[in-house]
Protein backbone atom coordinates (compact mmCIF):
# COMPACT_ATOMS: atom_id res chain seq x y z
CA UNK A 1 0.00 0.00 0.00
CA UNK A 2 1.36 3.40 -0.98
CA UNK A 3 1.88 5.79 1.91
CA UNK A 4 3.59 9.11 2.52
CA UNK A 5 5.67 7.23 5.10
CA UNK A 6 7.07 4.74 2.56
CA UNK A 7 10.84 4.51 2.63
CA UNK A 8 11.31 5.74 6.19
CA UNK A 9 11.90 2.26 7.64
CA UNK A 10 12.45 -1.36 6.72
CA UNK A 11 11.14 -2.52 10.10
CA UNK A 12 7.97 -0.77 11.39
CA UNK A 13 9.69 0.35 14.59
CA UNK A 14 10.04 4.04 15.44
CA UNK A 15 12.29 5.04 18.32
CA UNK A 16 10.35 7.67 20.24
CA UNK A 17 11.94 11.10 20.65
CA UNK A 18 12.62 11.43 24.40
CA UNK A 19 13.63 14.93 25.48
CA UNK A 20 16.13 15.39 28.25
CA UNK A 21 19.03 13.43 26.82
CA UNK A 22 17.80 9.88 26.22
CA UNK A 23 17.34 10.30 22.46
CA UNK A 24 20.96 11.01 21.64
CA UNK A 25 22.56 10.79 18.17
CA UNK A 26 24.05 7.36 18.85
CA UNK A 27 20.66 5.88 19.68
CA UNK A 28 18.88 7.43 16.69
CA UNK A 29 21.62 6.27 14.32
CA UNK A 30 21.71 2.72 15.72
CA UNK A 31 17.96 2.33 15.27
CA UNK A 32 18.13 3.73 11.75
CA UNK A 33 21.01 1.43 10.78
CA UNK A 34 18.97 -1.57 11.97
CA UNK A 35 16.07 -0.60 9.70
CA UNK A 36 13.88 1.31 12.12
CA UNK A 37 13.28 5.06 12.26
CA UNK A 38 15.45 6.84 14.81
CA UNK A 39 14.51 10.22 16.25
CA UNK A 40 16.29 13.14 17.83
CA UNK A 41 14.36 15.05 20.49
CA UNK A 42 14.60 18.79 19.86
CA UNK A 43 12.86 19.69 23.12
CA UNK A 44 14.95 21.54 25.74
CA UNK A 45 17.90 21.89 23.36
CA UNK A 46 19.24 25.15 22.00
CA UNK A 47 18.97 25.61 18.25
CA UNK A 48 22.74 25.23 17.93
CA UNK A 49 22.67 22.11 20.10
CA UNK A 50 20.11 20.57 17.77
CA UNK A 51 22.18 21.53 14.73
CA UNK A 52 25.24 19.83 16.20
CA UNK A 53 23.24 16.66 16.86
CA UNK A 54 21.96 16.67 13.28
CA UNK A 55 25.56 16.66 12.07
CA UNK A 56 26.44 13.83 14.44
CA UNK A 57 23.62 11.59 13.25
CA UNK A 58 24.47 12.25 9.61
CA UNK A 59 28.07 11.24 10.32
CA UNK A 60 26.85 7.95 11.79
CA UNK A 61 24.20 6.89 9.27
CA UNK A 62 22.88 7.58 5.82
CA UNK A 63 19.50 6.09 6.72
CA UNK A 64 16.38 8.23 7.30
CA UNK A 65 15.84 9.71 10.74
CA UNK A 66 13.54 12.29 12.27
CA UNK A 67 13.47 15.24 14.64
CA UNK A 68 10.75 16.10 17.16
CA UNK A 69 9.86 19.64 18.21
CA UNK A 70 7.77 20.94 21.12
CA UNK A 71 5.15 23.51 20.18
CA UNK A 72 5.49 26.84 22.04
CA UNK A 73 3.31 27.24 25.11
CA UNK A 74 1.51 30.27 26.54
CA UNK A 75 3.13 32.63 29.02
CA UNK A 76 1.91 33.41 32.51
CA UNK A 77 -0.22 36.58 32.57
CA UNK A 78 0.92 39.54 34.67
CA UNK A 79 -0.65 39.89 38.09
CA UNK A 80 -2.78 42.71 36.69
CA UNK A 81 -4.21 40.33 34.11
CA UNK A 82 -2.40 41.82 31.15
CA UNK A 83 -1.31 39.46 28.39
CA UNK A 84 2.38 38.98 27.70
CA UNK A 85 2.26 36.20 25.15
CA UNK A 86 2.24 36.24 21.38
CA UNK A 87 -0.56 34.24 19.76
CA UNK A 88 -0.29 30.61 20.83
CA UNK A 89 -0.24 27.74 18.32
CA UNK A 90 -3.21 25.50 17.72
CA UNK A 91 -4.25 23.84 20.96
CA UNK A 92 -1.72 25.51 23.29
CA UNK A 93 -2.71 25.37 26.94
CA UNK A 94 -4.00 28.48 28.73
CA UNK A 95 -1.55 30.47 30.86
CA UNK A 96 -1.38 29.93 34.62
CA UNK A 97 -1.53 32.60 37.32
CA UNK A 98 1.80 33.41 39.01
CA UNK A 99 0.18 32.75 42.40
CA UNK A 100 -0.09 29.05 41.56
CA UNK A 101 3.61 28.94 40.75
CA UNK A 102 4.47 30.75 43.98
CA UNK A 103 2.52 28.17 45.98
CA UNK A 104 4.33 25.32 44.27
CA UNK A 105 7.66 27.02 44.87
CA UNK A 106 6.82 27.00 48.57
CA UNK A 107 5.71 23.37 48.32
CA UNK A 108 9.08 22.18 46.97
CA UNK A 109 11.33 24.63 48.84
CA UNK A 110 12.46 21.85 51.17
CA UNK A 111 13.84 19.94 48.18
CA UNK A 112 16.16 22.84 47.40
CA UNK A 113 17.49 22.68 50.95
CA UNK A 114 17.82 18.90 50.87
CA UNK A 115 19.75 18.84 47.58
CA UNK A 116 21.58 22.09 48.35
CA UNK A 117 20.63 23.69 45.06
CA UNK A 118 18.40 26.68 44.23
CA UNK A 119 15.06 26.36 42.54
CA UNK A 120 15.08 27.46 38.92
CA UNK A 121 13.56 30.73 37.79
CA UNK A 122 10.76 30.05 35.28
CA UNK A 123 11.31 33.47 33.72
CA UNK A 124 14.91 32.74 32.75
CA UNK A 125 14.28 30.17 30.06
CA UNK A 126 11.49 31.48 27.88
CA UNK A 127 8.39 29.61 26.78
CA UNK A 128 8.96 28.83 23.12
CA UNK A 129 11.88 26.37 23.49
CA UNK A 130 13.63 28.14 20.61
CA UNK A 131 10.92 26.84 18.30
CA UNK A 132 11.28 29.34 15.44
CA UNK A 133 15.06 28.96 15.31
CA UNK A 134 14.79 25.17 15.26
CA UNK A 135 12.20 25.28 12.49
CA UNK A 136 14.53 27.52 10.49
CA UNK A 137 17.42 25.06 10.92
CA UNK A 138 15.27 22.13 9.82
CA UNK A 139 14.14 24.05 6.74
CA UNK A 140 17.75 24.89 5.87
CA UNK A 141 19.02 21.38 6.70
CA UNK A 142 15.99 19.20 5.87
CA UNK A 143 15.51 15.79 7.47
CA UNK A 144 13.14 13.12 6.15
CA UNK A 145 10.53 13.63 8.88
CA UNK A 146 9.71 16.14 11.62
CA UNK A 147 7.18 15.40 14.35
CA UNK A 148 5.47 17.79 16.74
CA UNK A 149 4.30 17.46 20.33
CA UNK A 150 1.97 19.60 22.51
CA UNK A 151 -0.06 20.90 19.61
CA UNK A 152 -0.27 21.28 15.86
CA UNK A 153 1.77 23.82 13.89
CA UNK A 154 0.05 26.41 11.77
CA UNK A 155 -0.64 25.29 8.19
CA UNK A 156 2.04 27.62 6.82
CA UNK A 157 4.70 25.79 8.86
CA UNK A 158 3.53 22.41 7.60
CA UNK A 159 3.51 23.78 4.05
CA UNK A 160 7.08 25.05 4.46
CA UNK A 161 8.27 21.59 5.42
CA UNK A 162 6.40 20.06 2.50
CA UNK A 163 8.25 22.38 0.11
CA UNK A 164 11.63 21.07 1.28
CA UNK A 165 10.53 17.43 1.10
CA UNK A 166 10.11 16.83 4.84
CA UNK A 167 7.16 14.75 5.98
CA UNK A 168 5.33 16.03 9.06
CA UNK A 169 3.83 14.00 11.91
CA UNK A 170 1.63 15.48 14.64
CA UNK A 171 1.22 13.72 17.99
CA UNK A 172 -2.44 13.32 18.98
CA UNK A 173 -4.23 11.91 22.01
CA UNK A 174 -7.84 12.12 20.81
CA UNK A 175 -9.88 11.82 17.64
CA UNK A 176 -10.65 15.55 17.82
CA UNK A 177 -6.94 16.41 17.82
CA UNK A 178 -6.44 14.01 14.91
CA UNK A 179 -9.13 15.71 12.84
CA UNK A 180 -7.66 19.15 13.58
CA UNK A 181 -4.17 18.00 12.54
CA UNK A 182 -5.52 16.51 9.32
CA UNK A 183 -7.29 19.77 8.49
CA UNK A 184 -4.09 21.73 9.20
CA UNK A 185 -2.20 19.67 6.62
CA UNK A 186 -0.14 17.15 8.60
CA UNK A 187 1.18 14.22 6.57
CA UNK A 188 0.71 11.63 9.32
CA UNK A 189 -0.20 11.25 12.98
CA UNK A 190 1.45 9.68 15.99
CA UNK A 191 -1.44 8.31 18.07
CA UNK A 192 -0.36 8.27 21.72
CA UNK A 193 -2.23 6.11 24.20
CA UNK A 194 -2.39 6.87 27.89
CA UNK A 195 0.06 4.01 28.59
CA UNK A 196 2.95 6.02 27.15
CA UNK A 197 5.88 7.10 29.28
CA UNK A 198 6.91 10.72 29.57
CA UNK A 199 4.72 13.61 28.53
CA UNK A 200 1.24 13.20 27.19
CA UNK A 201 1.20 14.91 23.83
CA UNK A 202 -2.21 16.50 24.43
CA UNK A 203 -2.71 19.71 22.50
CA UNK A 204 -4.23 21.39 25.53
CA UNK A 205 -3.65 20.70 29.23
CA UNK A 206 -6.83 21.59 31.10
CA UNK A 207 -5.84 22.68 34.63
CA UNK A 208 -9.25 21.57 35.92
CA UNK A 209 -8.62 17.94 34.99
CA UNK A 210 -6.26 15.89 37.20
CA UNK A 211 -3.47 14.00 35.40
CA UNK A 212 -4.71 10.61 34.29
CA UNK A 213 -8.38 11.55 34.45
CA UNK A 214 -8.54 12.03 30.70
CA UNK A 215 -7.11 9.83 27.99
CA UNK A 216 -7.67 6.52 26.26
CA UNK A 217 -5.81 3.25 26.02
CA UNK A 218 -3.88 2.87 22.80
CA UNK A 219 -5.95 0.24 20.98
CA UNK A 220 -9.26 1.99 21.67
CA UNK A 221 -7.78 5.36 20.72
CA UNK A 222 -6.15 3.98 17.59
CA UNK A 223 -9.47 2.56 16.41
CA UNK A 224 -11.28 5.86 17.03
CA UNK A 225 -8.63 7.85 15.18
CA UNK A 226 -8.49 5.35 12.31
CA UNK A 227 -12.23 5.85 11.77
CA UNK A 228 -11.97 9.65 12.03
CA UNK A 229 -9.13 10.43 9.59
CA UNK A 230 -7.49 9.07 6.45
CA UNK A 231 -3.88 9.91 7.35
CA UNK A 232 -1.19 7.27 8.01
CA UNK A 233 -0.87 6.46 11.71
CA UNK A 234 2.02 5.59 14.00
CA UNK A 235 0.94 3.99 17.30
CA UNK A 236 2.61 4.82 20.62
CA UNK A 237 2.02 3.90 24.23
CA UNK A 238 3.30 1.02 26.35
CA UNK A 239 4.64 -1.03 23.43
CA UNK A 240 7.53 -3.28 24.49
CA UNK A 241 7.21 -6.49 22.44
CA UNK A 242 6.76 -7.50 18.82
CA UNK A 243 3.37 -9.03 19.57
CA UNK A 244 2.11 -5.60 20.60
CA UNK A 245 3.46 -4.17 17.35
CA UNK A 246 1.46 -6.81 15.48
CA UNK A 247 -1.65 -5.74 17.38
CA UNK A 248 -1.37 -2.06 16.48
CA UNK A 249 -0.58 -2.87 12.85
CA UNK A 250 -3.74 -4.97 12.75
CA UNK A 251 -5.65 -2.03 14.25
CA UNK A 252 -4.63 0.29 11.41
CA UNK A 253 -1.19 1.69 12.27
CA UNK A 254 1.71 1.60 9.81
CA UNK A 255 4.36 1.45 12.54
CA UNK A 256 4.80 1.38 16.30
CA UNK A 257 6.69 4.02 18.25
CA UNK A 258 8.59 2.79 21.31
CA UNK A 259 10.30 4.93 23.94
CA UNK A 260 10.68 3.06 27.22
CA UNK A 261 11.79 -0.05 25.31
CA UNK A 262 14.88 1.86 24.12
CA UNK A 263 15.69 3.60 27.43
CA UNK A 264 17.73 0.67 28.75
CA UNK A 265 19.84 0.33 25.59
CA UNK A 266 23.55 1.13 26.02
CA UNK A 267 23.26 3.82 23.31
CA UNK A 268 20.51 5.62 25.24
CA UNK A 269 21.53 8.85 26.92
CA UNK A 270 19.29 8.17 29.93
CA UNK A 271 20.98 8.36 33.33
CA UNK A 272 22.17 4.94 34.61
CA UNK A 273 19.91 5.33 37.67
CA UNK A 274 16.95 5.82 35.34
CA UNK A 275 17.85 2.73 33.34
CA UNK A 276 18.16 0.58 36.46
CA UNK A 277 14.92 1.89 37.91
CA UNK A 278 12.90 0.48 35.00
CA UNK A 279 13.23 -3.05 36.37
CA UNK A 280 14.06 -2.25 40.02
CA UNK A 281 11.43 -3.88 42.30
CA UNK A 282 11.48 -0.71 44.43
CA UNK A 283 9.50 1.03 41.69
CA UNK A 284 6.27 -0.92 41.37
CA UNK A 285 4.12 1.25 39.11
CA UNK A 286 3.77 4.45 37.11
CA UNK A 287 1.49 7.47 37.36
CA UNK A 288 0.71 10.55 35.32
CA UNK A 289 1.88 13.64 37.18
CA UNK A 290 2.56 17.35 36.76
CA UNK A 291 5.10 17.27 39.62
CA UNK A 292 8.23 17.60 37.50
CA UNK A 293 7.21 19.73 34.52
CA UNK A 294 3.73 21.18 34.98
CA UNK A 295 2.27 18.96 32.25
CA UNK A 296 0.91 15.43 32.65
CA UNK A 297 3.76 12.96 32.18
CA UNK A 298 4.03 9.30 33.12
CA UNK A 299 6.80 8.49 35.57
CA UNK A 300 7.79 5.71 37.91
CA UNK A 301 6.29 6.60 41.28
CA UNK A 302 9.00 7.86 43.64
CA UNK A 303 9.12 10.06 46.72
CA UNK A 304 9.09 13.38 44.82
CA UNK A 305 6.03 12.38 42.83
CA UNK A 306 4.13 11.14 45.88
CA UNK A 307 4.88 14.21 47.99
CA UNK A 308 4.45 16.96 45.41
CA UNK A 309 2.34 15.58 42.57
CA UNK A 310 -1.03 16.45 44.16
CA UNK A 311 0.00 20.12 44.47
CA UNK A 312 1.65 20.73 41.09
CA UNK A 313 -0.07 23.36 38.91
CA UNK A 314 -0.76 23.03 35.20
CA UNK A 315 2.16 25.31 34.38
CA UNK A 316 4.42 24.04 31.62
CA UNK A 317 7.25 24.83 31.04
CA UNK A 318 7.50 26.96 34.19
CA UNK A 319 7.47 23.98 36.56
CA UNK A 320 9.96 22.16 34.33
CA UNK A 321 12.44 25.02 34.69
CA UNK A 322 11.70 25.40 38.40
CA UNK A 323 12.53 21.75 39.14
CA UNK A 324 15.29 21.19 36.59
CA UNK A 325 18.12 21.90 39.01
CA UNK A 326 16.57 19.70 41.67
CA UNK A 327 16.37 16.74 39.31
CA UNK A 328 19.97 17.19 38.20
CA UNK A 329 21.11 17.47 41.82
CA UNK A 330 19.23 14.30 42.74
CA UNK A 331 20.91 12.44 39.88
CA UNK A 332 24.33 13.75 40.92
CA UNK A 333 23.63 12.57 44.48
CA UNK A 334 22.67 9.11 43.22
CA UNK A 335 19.10 9.53 44.45
CA UNK A 336 16.43 8.25 42.03
CA UNK A 337 13.74 9.32 44.52
CA UNK A 338 14.21 12.92 43.38
CA UNK A 339 14.51 12.29 39.64
CA UNK A 340 11.92 12.34 36.88
CA UNK A 341 11.91 8.65 35.99
CA UNK A 342 9.83 8.79 32.82
CA UNK A 343 8.51 5.35 31.92
CA UNK A 344 5.55 3.72 30.21
CA UNK A 345 3.28 1.15 31.79
CA UNK A 346 5.32 -1.70 30.32
CA UNK A 347 8.58 -0.59 31.94
CA UNK A 348 9.25 -3.97 33.59
CA UNK A 349 9.59 -5.47 30.11
CA UNK A 350 12.64 -3.31 29.33
CA UNK A 351 15.61 -5.24 27.90
CA UNK A 352 19.24 -4.25 28.19
CA UNK A 353 20.07 -4.87 24.54
CA UNK A 354 21.99 -2.80 21.99
CA UNK A 355 19.50 -0.70 20.06
CA UNK A 356 20.14 -2.39 16.72
CA UNK A 357 19.79 -5.81 18.29
CA UNK A 358 16.53 -4.73 19.95
CA UNK A 359 15.11 -3.68 16.57
CA UNK A 360 15.98 -7.11 15.13
CA UNK A 361 14.45 -8.91 18.14
CA UNK A 362 11.25 -6.85 17.89
CA UNK A 363 11.03 -7.64 14.18
CA UNK A 364 11.47 -11.36 14.87
CA UNK A 365 8.74 -11.21 17.53
CA UNK A 366 6.50 -9.34 15.10
CA UNK A 367 7.00 -11.98 12.43
CA UNK A 368 6.35 -14.75 14.94
CA UNK A 369 3.16 -13.08 16.15
CA UNK A 370 1.97 -12.65 12.58
CA UNK A 371 2.47 -16.33 11.77
CA UNK A 372 1.27 -17.73 15.10
CA UNK A 373 -2.30 -18.65 14.04
CA UNK A 374 -1.03 -20.65 11.06
CA UNK A 375 1.57 -22.38 13.21
CA UNK A 376 -1.19 -23.50 15.55
CA UNK A 377 -3.03 -25.06 12.66
CA UNK A 378 -5.68 -22.38 12.49
CA UNK A 379 -7.00 -21.18 9.12
Image (cartoon, rainbow, N blue to C red):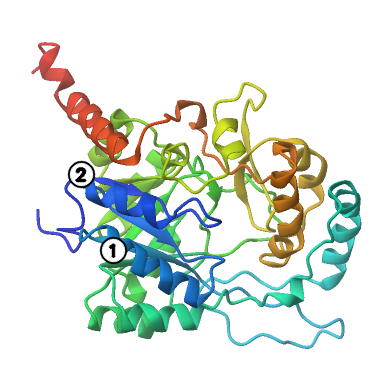
Relative to residue 373, is residue 326 drawn left or right?
Answer: right
Q: Which mark is residue 11?
A: 2
* Residue at the image position 24 percent from the left and 81 percent from the top: 164
Up the image or down, 295 lies above or below 284; here it is below
Up the image or down, 197 lies above or below 28; here it is above
**Nearer to us: label 1 or label 2:** 1
* Residue at the image position 67 percent from the left and 65 percent from the top: 316
- Local packing at callout 1 (Cα closer than 10 Å; few below 14, some 14-19, many 20+) is few
Residue wearing tag 1:
59
15 or 62, nearer to the observer? 62
Q: In terms of image quadrants, where is residue 46?
A: bottom right
Up the image or down, 251 lies above or below 283; here it is below
The reply to whether discs 1 and 2 touch (Cβ–Cβ < 8 Å) is no
Give percent across and percent down for residue 346.
48, 31
* Count of numbered badges drawn on the protein: 2
* Residue at the image position 49 percent from the left and 77 percent from the top: 47
Give percent across and percent down for residue 91.
53, 71
Relative to residue 190, is residue 11 drawn left or right?
Answer: left
Give percent across and percent down for residue 279.
55, 26
292 or 209, nearer to the observer? 292
Q: Would residue 188 be visible to someone looking at this image?
A: no
- Which residue reaches farthest top? 377
Secondary element under disc 2, as helix, strand or loop, is loop
Up the image or down, 255 lies above or below 187; here it is above
Secondary element under disc 1, as helix, strand or loop, is helix
Q: In terms of image quadrants, where is residue 83?
A: bottom right
Amino acid sequence: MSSVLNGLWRVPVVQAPMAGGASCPGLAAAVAEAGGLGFLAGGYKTADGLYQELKQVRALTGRPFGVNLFLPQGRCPHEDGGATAPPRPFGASPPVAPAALDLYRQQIAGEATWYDTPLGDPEDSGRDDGYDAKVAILLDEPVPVVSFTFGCPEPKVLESFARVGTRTVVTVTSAAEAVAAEHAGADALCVQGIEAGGHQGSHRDDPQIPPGARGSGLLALLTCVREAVRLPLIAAGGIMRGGQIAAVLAAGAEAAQLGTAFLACPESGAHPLHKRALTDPVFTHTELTRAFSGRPARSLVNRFLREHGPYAPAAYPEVHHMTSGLRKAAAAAGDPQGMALWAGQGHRLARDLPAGRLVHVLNAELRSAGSAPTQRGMP
